[in-house]
Amino acid sequence: MSHDETLKESLTRNGVSRRGFLKFCATAASIMALPPSMVPAIAAALESARRPSVIWLSFQECTGCAESLTRSHSPTVEGLIFDAISLDYQHTLQAAAGDAAEEAREEAMKENWGKYILVVDGSIPLGNPGYSTIAGISNLDMLKETAKGAAAIVAVGTCATFGGIPKANPNPTGAVSVSDIIKDKPIVNVSGCPPIPVVITGVLAHFLTFGTIPELDELGRPKVFYGNNIHDRCYRRPFYERGEFAETFDDEGAKKGWCLFKLGCKGPITYNACATAKWNEGTSFPIESGHGCLGCSEPNFWDMGGFYKALSQPAVDVSQTAAYALGAGAVAGLGIAALNRKKKADVATDHQTVTIHDLRRNDPSKTEAEDS
Amino acid sequence: MDHREKVIMSERVVVDPITRIEGHLRVEAQMNGNTIEQAYSSGTMVRGIELIMQGRDPRDAWAFAQRICGVCTLVHGIASVRAVEDALDYKIPKNAEIIRNLMVASQYVHDHVMHFYHLHALDWVDVVSALSADPKATSELAQSVSPHWPKSSPGYFSDMRKKLKGFVEGGQLGIFAKGYWGHPAYKLPPEANLMAVSHYLEALTWQRNVVKLHTIFGGKNPHPNFLVGGVPCPIDLNSDSAINMKRLSQVQDIITEMMTFVEQVYIPDTLTIASYYKEWGKQGEGVGNFLCYGDFPSNGMGDSSSFMIPGGVILNRDLTKVHPVDMSKQDEIQEFVAHSWYDYEGGKEKGLHPYDGETNLNYTGPKPPYKQLDVDESYSWMKSPRWNGQVMETGPLARVLNLYAQGHEQTQELVNMTLKHLDLPVEALFSTLGRTAARTLETKIIGDAMQGWLNDLIINIKAGDTKTFNETQWDPSQWPSEARGVGYMEAPRGALAHWIVIKDSIIDNYQAVVPSTWNAGPRDAKGQAGPYEAALEGTDLHDPKQPIEILRTIHSFDPCIACAVHLTDPDGEEIMKVKVV
């Protein structure tokens, strides 16, 4: 089979040495009126005209994340895997099976050592290596082996990023996340159950376009998608401010699109792009279709105490929140957004009540001080 | 490696990972020459979701259950809300029933098309051969099998070939790397290969559009939202934030787009490809027993006579008799663990009804990394469900046979048309080819019904009924202190049921018996092989190093292994002990 050579390979085949190749790059730089310091960059760009290799490992997962990848409309999954990357190992889509599939993984690792992107979906069980194996190899061993030669790791979905549903109480298989195991590689956490399709491809596209990992929050998630909580970006937020809540599904408030806070919406403590990017080419998102946010991009969201329990049940009544909100206007919104991470994690884990006092805080440093 | 070990190894063909499926499946085939003598199916991953569900709010159960699988996303959500509703005798509004039917049916159409093109096709379609296709001849072929599909000009196929050529000749084959290209089992002419590869890409675009039906009613896909007692999306023609005319129009467009592709691409492609593989109408049958629970109610789950797909069991290929199924009878549906990595307190030989389901994780397989399983002992994370002690196949073929046997006119027409087109006898249905064809035919049957449900929804709304949620039993304080129920459905991959026991408003026990467990489960206490295992017996492998024949038959079942592996245990402490070990 003929091989579409990079320029470097073509020059090498025609007897041009490394020195000759660099000289070629220097000539090119001068023609383009670029400083000599650009020569190495040009050389690197020319050498790497091949599509970057991506190896995707699936461990304790439901394939919802791979399905979500196929739903991406921009970039499209076909644009991504046929034009932008070389998806060399991915169980759901790859033609090869059995030994041939494992050979594909091993070859991709060897040929692209130090350069490939490793994508992982699913958690890793530490309870017993026999809880999850591929080709007779435990997930732990395969992750460690494949991570070694990776340039960066993208953990896709809440199972790979935070342990997800396998880790939910009582975590019967001892499931852990990728970052619990791999400590010496850059890891991007793309959480969500599953993540929004364009968020998965968006992170890969960022890496391919800019050659860097996007800026991350303290949980390792790209700020561009996880920088704001859903509540702050929700189109129903004005109803929260006015104290207009759906009291049950299908009541007048539900039909009119009022706030789902009282029906258990976890939007205020959930950082994700659902309310802005929305789902499936901007068609809708859970709140728009009448169901509260489950909080699926947050660690331990399965153990937050119930999907239909209002997150914040001040001792008095939620209507008090509303009354406050009416009085203080937008400050309430700022306040809830400013709850520091630890506090929010505690609320999530213990399903603590969030009081009006909590809502009123809008200075993270002050909140920190008050908490300690 | 000593000599004896070498001999054993050479007789065993191992395929792990089986790719282009959901989940983690391993197949080991004991060979006699080039013929499979015995096959062993092993699920190699366990999470323990049912155990995780214990002690939680039954109204939350659907979200947990749904994460059993993200491919047949929603089916476990539906089975779960039905289980809770059955336990509490909780009725849902008419509109909710229709919307659920629409969502389940659209899952079928989406799932079956994706299975055909993205999971199954590469067993029959040689991507590399497509490079030598003549675009003009490909266009003629495409227009002869589907005269109305617009993407069929010589220019279109010329572009597709160019794109593919650039991809293959670039030397980076990506997802197509290491396929068995050029294997003599590939029988399609280059033109049919090019047409199929083009439709592979078209189907990727199509599926992304048609899943939006789930997004409209459930907010997202994968994993749309559900609700015990109805559906979460309200209907209000005068609201910009509910199911309104704009949303109904979108749903109509999606149904049209779905069915246009099914009729003009999926069905013609199935028939065209099948016509080159008629010999597969004689192999890969398996057990010859078929199980359905039935689905698509028009008068509540309590009235099974209102189901569009009937329930019933067919034994030994006998289409003249359909046996009824009782899901609550203690000795009818049972699960066995004789060859599974679980223990039963009453011993590994026993079978248990799902209400009394009991599972203690006990991995006794070889220590990873391993080369071969000990198939005389336990060898899978799947259990072995049985109906009256018998092995059952479930899925599209079971449903089509049930519809056919029970006199469903459209089914009989479609089946007869297909057999006539391929010049094959009725017996050809019981095969790898029959299973794949049945999936295509039921896509048409269920897809066609969607238009009727959308019309019903509109008629209902027009009559002034916009109710989507029944509030009366939402509050747990109104529930009995103890309740049990079964939620069942026909998932794209077959008969699915969840059994729930509720005590003091929380989940006391939860058990899912899923289609791929019926199909992919290991041997039982009597040594009866599961459907995958039985279907592979007697298959000849042209080249044991390139076991494409195994992939063809296994993929014809559309495996969903994360679904198939589950556990539950009324006594959590037992499991914790195992975890410590």
Image (spheres, helix red, strand yellow):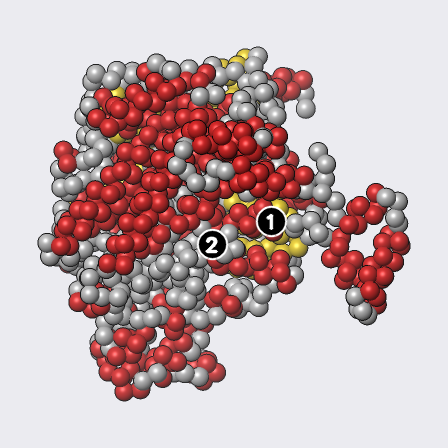
Nearest the eye: A218 or A334: A334
Q: Is residue B89 left or right of residue B103?
A: left
User: Which label number is shown at residue A83?
Assistant: 1
* Residue nearest the observer in this picture, B385 or B507: B385
Q: Quadrant of residue B397?
A: top left
The lab-note entry on whether marks 1 and 2 share a chain reads yes
Any part of residue B362 in sight: no
Residue B94: percent from the left, percent from the top?
A: 15, 49
Mark 2 element type: loop
The answer to whether the residues at label 1 and label 2 have Cβ atoms under 8 Å apart is no
Q: What amino acid is at disc 2?
A: His
Marked residue nearer the N-terminal end (1 or 2): 2
Give the letter of the chain under mark 2.
Answer: A
> On screen, A362 above or below A20?
below
Mark 2 neighbour density, 10 Å: few (under 14) some (14–19) many (20 or more): some
Residue A366 is drawn in which quadrant?
bottom left
The residue depicted at 30 percent of the width and 76 percent of the height is A238
Q: Amino acid at mark 1?
A: Asp
The residue under label 2 is A73
- Determine whether, in the image, residue A116 is placed left or right of residue B359: right
| Residue B541 location, quadrant | top right
**Quick check: B58 left or right of B258?**
left
State the residue at coordinates (21%, 26%): B409
Q: How many marks?
A: 2
Residue visible at 55% across and 50% down? A79
